Image (cartoon, helix red, strand yellow):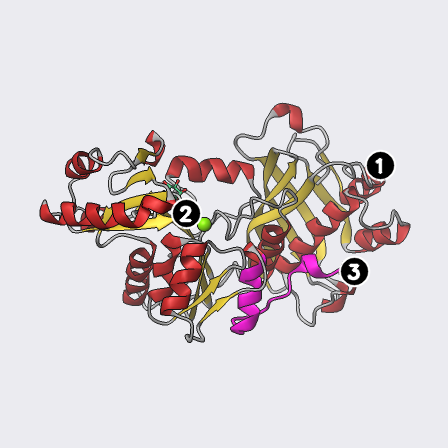
Amino acid sequence: MDRLSSSPRLMIVSDLDHTMVDHHDPENLSILRFNALWEAKYRQDSLLVFSTGRSPTLYKQLRREKPMLTPDITIMSVGTEITYGNDMVQDEGWIEFLNQKWDKQIVSEETSKFSELTMQSETEQRRHKASFYVKKENAQEVMKTLSERLAKRGLDIKIIYSGGMDLDILPKGAGKGQALAYLHKKLKEKGKLPKNTLACGDSGNDAELFTIPDVHGVIVKNAQEELLQWHAENAKNNPKIIHANERCAAGIIEAIGHFKLGPNISSRDVTDLSDAKLDHFDPAYEVVKFFLFYERWRRAEVENHEVYLSNLKSVCSPSGVFVHPLGVHQSLHVCIDKLKDCCGDKKEEQYRVWVDQVFPSQIDSDTWLVKFQKWEQTGQEQQGCLTTVVVSSKGVKPTEGLTWLHVHQTWMEGTTKNSRNDWFF
Ligand code: GLC
Ligand code: MG
């Protein structure tokens, strides 16, 4: 949050399961489209917030399975835990606030009296969240009786039903919406209230996100019945909340366009990237484009044509060097020659490449240092490298693209040894 010196241009607050992440798309196309758009056009001056029902344990698991970006802020356990940055530093103030009129022991005693409730796994029981499964047909009745009983015992709680099966019991002041309101208040105090906020969701626990003042909202196409019902009863005529025509992250991109919140064309939607010229230098955009080309090359989605490689060579300095994460260094031109051998080598596989946290900084009048994480996923396996690139605008026009002078990579923690032998860039 502190990396921005002024108000973020856009703050996206998105649910994960069935909103940012489409569990019915093994190719992960919509999230990858969103990633390319975010890194090229928003990362530097906007805030990405993930707001999930998952505990930290299940959240981290999802990150290992899907091509997810790193958010600036993570709201987990249905708005009961807020963390900041890559180190996921807890917001202690929020924890303190949620302690009011909350006693988990009493919640356990009262819930144990309902045979309709089945406890969720141990990882999903958190300090300010008790979670169960309950059948749709029993949900309303259980929620009503349980809230009466807990109120009688002096607790101030809320019960949320999501996905037609999950029942969460939280302190009254908790929840995804309240967590967002809390963040808005904090940002405002620092003079950094976002110019626009877009909330994105698909199920019951997302409903309160859409009740926060001045928030645009998108209910993705594939939303759950309970959220559609909430929309029909509470927000049908509210032009700031739309039910998208597109599924999951594609619905988020659709909403960015619908509300005119900024650029809404992902580089992934551009077939011929060599046509996508700019009228100004944009290092983040060039990094996104380069690795998208690289993915397409290895998936054989571009023709194995000399022209592409010579174009690529023409934007690399002849004295440019690539320091491979294995510690070997080579001329950039030699590396590009080597790409000939890997055209289409991932054709039959679910192979994807994306970049995360692309941060360019201008180091002199015509040079930028761009830092980011570059990731590859083949099937279920992810590999990543911390990457630094130096690019220069000396002697070139924006339409020609920046000149790459240096690329340096280091394996990210967790990348296994046996998956490192076909890493070209
Ligand atoms: C996630 C959590 C679960 C919760 C559900 C709905 O699936 O893991 O505990 O009940 O979201 O909020
Ligand atoms: Mg969801």
Residue shown at 10% from the left, 44% from the top: 153
As measured in the structure, the alpha-carbon distance from the residue carrying label 1 to the one carrying label 3 is 22 Å
Q: Is mark 3 on a helix, strand or loop?
A: loop
- Residue 402 in the image, given as x and y percentages of width and height: 71, 60
Residue 32 forms part of the magenta stretch? no
Lower sequence index among marks 2 and 1: 2
Lower sequence index among marks 2 and 3: 2
Look at mark 1 in the image and give the residue it sits on.
341
Dots 2, 3 in contact, CB < 8 A? no
Amino acid type at mark 3: Asp
42, above or below 387, in the image: below
Look at mark 3 in the image and give the residue it sits on.
272
Residue shown at 41% from the left, 65% from the top: 231
Instruction: Count numbered badges in the picture.
Output: 3
* Magenta residues, start to end: 250-272
For label 3, being within 8 Å of ligand 2 is answered no
139, above or below 194, in the image: above
* Observer-nearest of 405 and 311: 311
As measured in the structure, the alpha-carbon distance from the residue carrying label 2 to the one carrying label 1 is 50 Å
Closer to the eye: label 1 or 3: 3
- Residue 15 in the image, given as x and y percentages of width and height: 44, 52
As measured in the structure, the alpha-carbon distance from the residue carrying label 2 to the one carrying label 3 is 43 Å
Lower sequence index among marks 1 and 3: 3
Q: Is mark 1 on a helix, strand or loop?
A: helix
Query: How dense is the environment of label 3, judged by Cα within 10 Å: few (below 14), some, or many (20 and up)?
Result: few
Amino acid type at mark 2: Gly
Residue shown at 56% from the left, 58% from the top: 38
- Residue 169 in the image, given as x and y percentages of width and height: 26, 45
* Observer-nearest of 419 and 30: 30
Look at mark 2 in the image and give the residue it sits on.
164
- Residue 410 in the image, given as x and y percentages of width and height: 59, 36
